[in-house]
Image (cartoon, rainbow, N blue to C red):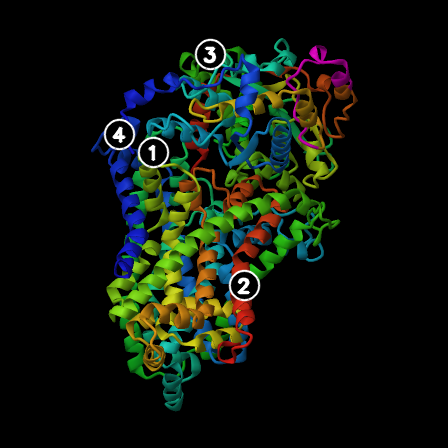
């Protein structure tokens, strides 16, 4: 195989001429027929995996697209893969056609020109998307510009076992007080796990006086000063954690097992419906409920993006479009299935679909949209990276 | 054509290892042109040295590695010394053999649930004995010292070493030695240690080294049972390999070299230890002491042997129970309800993964089998046999830590623009499958002794594995009497009937040796089914086998899903063995001499 220089590799992707044009949807559908789409999505949650299987069945029925779920342990793996392919000059038919992505990974891929597009706002179902009320055009403050299409809304909630905790907490400080009084009953996933870093960000947003400073890149802010309350908080919290902070669950769902085993009483989640779904799957006791903090909690959207070298970009767009369809969105919001928030605007939907959404029983442990309250903005992705690095230095190795 | 097969086999087996090491060496010294970095430089080494977790990660490679190897060896020696030839020993041997084919990851999953503070053992004694209605906040799994990880390794390595020892016992005339020792008044354990152990150890030395290298660099077991702040060096290498920041690949490569160095160092250390033990043992032998805590050592050995068997068996039963469990909270000893829901949710996924698993395993094992048969036949016709040095070559892919050459191999494959996916994975598996197929078949093939099959079959399925895999390489050194007795006669008879060598091969030799060939096939399949790292790194995530799916699920902690996958993974490894027993029995039902 011939090796290309890095410079040549950088020039090639956008010279590729045969890329499908999303504005000609009929042509996209035609090209998509018979394609196989490798969707790289985090595979640690069995409910999500089941949902992806269902999506595969539906796009195969309707459009003859075969969907293969490549189960990742970390989305960064997929970013690496595309990056290595680019470096190796694999500018067509790369291993990945679709990635479940957001935040820092999206920022990195967009920055490095590793994405196909813009396509998202050309998809037929974009017409239903709630562009006013939901953060679907920025991703962790980075403008999306059509390079990824949204498929689920997420918001931080805390799951707690009412058998052990009488009333929910209103702030991070209250959580700290409770943990001090009940040592060993709380933990969070080990950063750089996505949810673990989210916990750190949520704590930061709740602890700083003026969260607006977090919307600018970390380089432009007085980092030490802004994050000082966070590290002070962790200094106090860590010795009271499960296993005294000497071990951490490795992912979000691993916390469910800890609650079910009676090892901890509370856990952070990025999906308001996760608790209800987990109760239905016997993964949580039916005494678990959820709460949000008084000042509100962080929310963001989950997206799918298409690598620049996908050989099945048409098929991938068909999947992305299907994910935004009322049918798929309704199923994703069903707490028995996923319990993810929809990205659609109710007032843009046809009458029948709107009625179906309204008829949906959100389940015993899911807060209503009103109860979920105010959504706090995600900090700029550079904060997440920096805080995770700092955490690793302070707590990532045995002292 | 046939003449070139041995060379081809060596290339297929060692080529990827050599290429992988080369691919590791360059980036370790800062040379990764694909990323716009040209070396040589020491930046990557510098970055590695600046990583605050380095010392602890190295400790987590060395200590559990040496400890697991030492413990496994001691348990095996005590059990064999105290009990070989007894009924108890036979029972233990039969219980341990199937555990050998249980994939490491499945055993580790089961173990987590068994020994965690909220695990099965704790549930069985709570709250009536312990008073716990909540699990105690104890750090057992993921402990910073890596003890849980060591335990998981010991439970899997004891069967391996025991079966290797069994094979070796046949080569050293154990009964004769023991009879002499007993007549001179030596107690059982002391007598065995003084007269049988030295020659046996000489024969199991290479397998012991394999255990040491493997335990030091294992990834899947460490991911499941090991600590995370920081993880062991090999796990950290895999993490760095997966980071979007490409400069961390250089750090990973540097760490991979470091890992290789650690393994070499540990092997040297072990070698020095061997010398020390030999010197001290020699003096002990000269004292003529007839007994030394014999009864105590016997019981200790048995206790540990039973524990090792019991732990893995119970762990697998735990997986089975979880796979059918409804809600199951602490401290209930059993789930509130049982049902098929977990199987109907995850069953279809496991079937798809099993298809991929068998495809990869089947292809790699078929290639391995063809190459090995080619080698053996060529050896037979040319009259040349594998030397001791050849044996080392055979063991080399098992002695080089996976994390030292697989990252480099992945970098090379990508730079060469080779397509990722199934085929590269098949060849990566081949590196690990070939040695085992060779070892398991070589002996039977040379001996050409259908008695092997008979003996094996009477011992039951698992022990076929034992007998054939591990009767093994040492026969290279002293080809058995059976070879001399059987081989020429069969060949001569066939030749006098006018059969050319090829016809002898296809019509006489291969059919007669169907059972060992199938067993070797099963061994190859089991080895391939259990491979985690080659599948993950070389498959680019597109090749989803039961093992990679199960380890990915482990991070999510859904025990019901892990139960289903773990059970299917174990079945996938055991199924080929069942076939290796059944198929020849059915085919040769009219051939008493080849029958069981």
Q: Chain of mark 2?
A: B
Asked if residue B461 is positioned above or below residue B110 in the image, the reply reads below
> Who's the residue at 48% across and 71% down the image?
B301
Kindly identify which residue carries mark 3.
A216
- The label number, if any, that marks residue B33 in the structure image: 4
Whether residue B5 is visible here, answered yes or no, is yes
Residue A354: quadrant of the picture: top right
Magenta highlight range: A337-355
Instruction: Name the N-terminal-most of marks 1 and 4.
Output: 4
Q: CA distance from mark 1 to mark 4?
A: 14 Å
Q: CA distance from mark 3 to mark 2?
A: 64 Å
Q: Please state which of the two labelled residues, at mark 4 or mark 2, is closer to the viewer.
A: 2
Kindly identify which residue carries mark 1.
B417
- The label number, if any, that marks residue B579 in the structure image: 2
Q: Chain of mark 3?
A: A
> Who's the residue at 68% across and 36% down the image?
A278
Q: CA distance from mark 3 to mark 1?
A: 39 Å
Q: Is residue A22 left or right of residue B364?
A: right
Instruction: Name the N-terminal-most of marks 1 and 2.
Output: 1
Instruction: Name the N-terminal-most of marks 4 and 2.
Output: 4
The lab-note entry on whether marks 3 and 1 share a chain reads no
Residue A367: quadrant of the picture: top right
The lab-note entry on whether marks 4 and 2 share a chain reads yes
Mark 4 is surrounded, within 10 Å at the Cα level, by few (under 14), some (14 to 19) or many (20 or more) other residues, namely some
Asked if residue B133 is positioned above or below residue A351 in the image, the reply reads below
In contact (CB < 8 Å): disc 4 and disc 2: no
In contact (CB < 8 Å): disc 4 and disc 3: no
In contact (CB < 8 Å): disc 1 and disc 4: no
Whether residue B125 is visible here, answered yes or no, is no
């Amino acid at each position: 195989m011939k090796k290309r220089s890095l410079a040549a590799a950088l020039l090639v992707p956008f010279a590729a001429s045969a890329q499908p044009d999303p504005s000609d949807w009929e042509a996209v559908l035609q090209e998509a027929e018979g394609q196989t789409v490798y969707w790289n999505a985090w595979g640690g949650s069995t409910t999500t995996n089941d949902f992806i299987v269902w999506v595969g069945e539906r796009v195969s029925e309707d459009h003859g697209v075969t969907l293969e779920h490549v189960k990742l342990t970390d989305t960064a793996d997929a970013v690496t893969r595309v990056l290595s392919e680019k470096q190796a000059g694999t500018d067509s038919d790369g291993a990945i056609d679709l990635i479940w992505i957001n935040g820092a990974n999206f920022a990195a891929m967009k920055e490095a020109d590793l994405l196909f597009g813009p396509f998202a706002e050309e998809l037929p179902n974009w017409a239903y998307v709630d562009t006013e009320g939901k953060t679907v055009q920025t991703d962790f403050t980075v403008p999306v510009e059509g390079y990824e299409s949204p498929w689920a809304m997420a918001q931080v909630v805390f799951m707690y076992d009412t058998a052990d905790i009488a009333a929910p907490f209103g702030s991070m400080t209250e959580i700290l007080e409770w943990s001090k009084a009940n040592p060993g009953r709380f933990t969070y996933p080990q950063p750089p796990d996505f949810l673990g870093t989210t916990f750190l960000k949520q704590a930061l947003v709740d602890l700083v006086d003026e969260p607006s400073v977090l919307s600018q890149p970390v380089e432009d802010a007085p980092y030490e000063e802004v994050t000082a309350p966070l590290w002070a908080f962790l200094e106090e919290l860590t010795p009271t954690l499960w296993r005294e902070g000497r071990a951490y669950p490795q992912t979000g769902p691993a916390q469910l097992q800890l609650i079910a085993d009676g090892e901890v009483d509370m856990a952070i989640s990025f999906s308001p419906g996760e608790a209800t779904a987990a109760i239905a799957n016997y993964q949580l006791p039916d005494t678990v409920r959820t709460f949000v903090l008084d000042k509100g909690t962080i929310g963001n959207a989950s997206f799918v993006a298409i690598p620049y070298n996908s050989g099945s970009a048409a098929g991938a767009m068909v999947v992305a479009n299907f994910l935004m369809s009322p049918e798929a969105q309704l199923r994703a919001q069903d707490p028995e299935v996923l319990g993810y928030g929809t990205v659609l605007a109710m007032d843009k939907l046809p009458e029948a679909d709107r009625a179906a959404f309204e008829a949906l029983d959100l389940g015993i442990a899911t807060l209503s949209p009103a109860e979920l309250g105010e959504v706090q903005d995600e900090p700029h992705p550079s904060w997440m990276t920096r805080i995770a690095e700092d955490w690793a230095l302070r707590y990532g190795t045995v002292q | 054509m046939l003449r070139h097969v041995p060379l081809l086999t060596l290339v297929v087996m060692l080529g990827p290892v050599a290429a992988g090491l080369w691919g590791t060496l360059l980036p370790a010294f800062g040379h990764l042109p694909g990323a716009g970095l040209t070396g040589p430089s020491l930046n990557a080494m510098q970055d590695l040295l600046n990583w605050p977790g380095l010392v602890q990660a190295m400790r987590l490679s060395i200590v559990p590695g040496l400890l697991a190897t030492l413990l496994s060896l001691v348990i095996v020696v005590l059990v064999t010394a105290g009990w070989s030839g007894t009924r108890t020993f036979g029972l233990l041997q039969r219980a341990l053999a199937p555990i050998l084919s249980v994939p490491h990851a499945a055993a580790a999953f089961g173990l987590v649930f068994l020994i965690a503070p909220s695990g099965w053992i704790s549930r069985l004694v709570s709250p009536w004995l312990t008073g716990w209605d909540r699990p105690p906040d104890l750090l057992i799994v993921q402990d910073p010292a890596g003890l849980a990880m060591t335990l998981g390794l010991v439970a899997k390595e004891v069967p391996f070493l025991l079966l290797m020892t069994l094979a070796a016992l046949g080569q050293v005339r154990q009964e004769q030695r023991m009879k002499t020792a007993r007549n001179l008044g030596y107690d059982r354990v002391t007598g065995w240690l003084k007269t049988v152990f030295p020659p046996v150890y000489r024969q199991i030395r290479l397998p012991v080294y394999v255990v040491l290298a493997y335990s030091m660099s294992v990834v899947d077991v460490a991911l499941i049972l090991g600590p995370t702040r920081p993880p062991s060096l090999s796990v950290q290498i895999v993490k760095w390999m997966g980071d979007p920041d490409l400069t961390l690949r250089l750090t990973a490569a540097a760490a991979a070299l470091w890992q290789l160095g650690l393994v070499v160092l540990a092997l040297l250390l072990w070698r020095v230890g061997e010398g020390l033990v030999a010197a001290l043992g020699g003096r002990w032998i000269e004292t003529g002491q007839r007994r030394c805590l014999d009864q105590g050592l016997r019981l200790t050995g048995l206790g540990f042997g039973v524990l090792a068997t019991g732990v893995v068996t119970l762990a697998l039963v735990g997986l089975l129970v979880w796979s059918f469990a409804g809600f199951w909270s602490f401290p209930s000893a059993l789930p509130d309800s049982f049902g098929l829901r977990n199987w109907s949710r995850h069953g279809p996924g496991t079937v798809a993964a099993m298809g991929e698993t068998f495809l990869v395993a089947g292809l790699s094992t078929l290639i391995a089998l063809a190459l090995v048969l080619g080698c053996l036949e060529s050896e037979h016709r040319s009259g040349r046999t594998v030397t001791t040095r050849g044996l080392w070559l055979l063991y080399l892919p098992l002695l080089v830590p996976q994390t030292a050459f697989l990252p480099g191999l992945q970098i090379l494959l990508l730079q060469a623009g080779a397509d990722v996916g199934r085929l590269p994975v098949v060849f990566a598996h081949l590196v690990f499958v070939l040695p085992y197929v060779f070892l398991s078949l070589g002996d039977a093939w040379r001996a050409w002794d259908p008695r092997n099959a008979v003996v094996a079959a009477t011992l039951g399925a698992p022990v076929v594995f034992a007998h054939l895999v591990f009767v093994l390489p040492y026969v290279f050194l002293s080809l058995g009497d059976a070879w001399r007795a059987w081989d020429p006669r069969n060949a001569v008879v066939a030749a006098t009937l006018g059969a050319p060598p090829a016809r002898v091969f296809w019509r006489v030799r291969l059919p007669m040796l169907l059972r060992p060939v199938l067993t070797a096939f099963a061994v190859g399949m089991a080895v391939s089914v259990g491979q985690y790292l080659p599948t993950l790194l070389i498959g680019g995530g597109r090749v989803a086998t039961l093992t990679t799916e199960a380890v990915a699920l482990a991070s999510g902690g859904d025990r019901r899903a892990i139960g289903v996958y773990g059970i299917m993974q174990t079945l996938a490894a055991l199924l080929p063995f069942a076939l290796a027993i059944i198929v020849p029995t059915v085919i040769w039902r009219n051939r008493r001499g080849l029958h069981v």
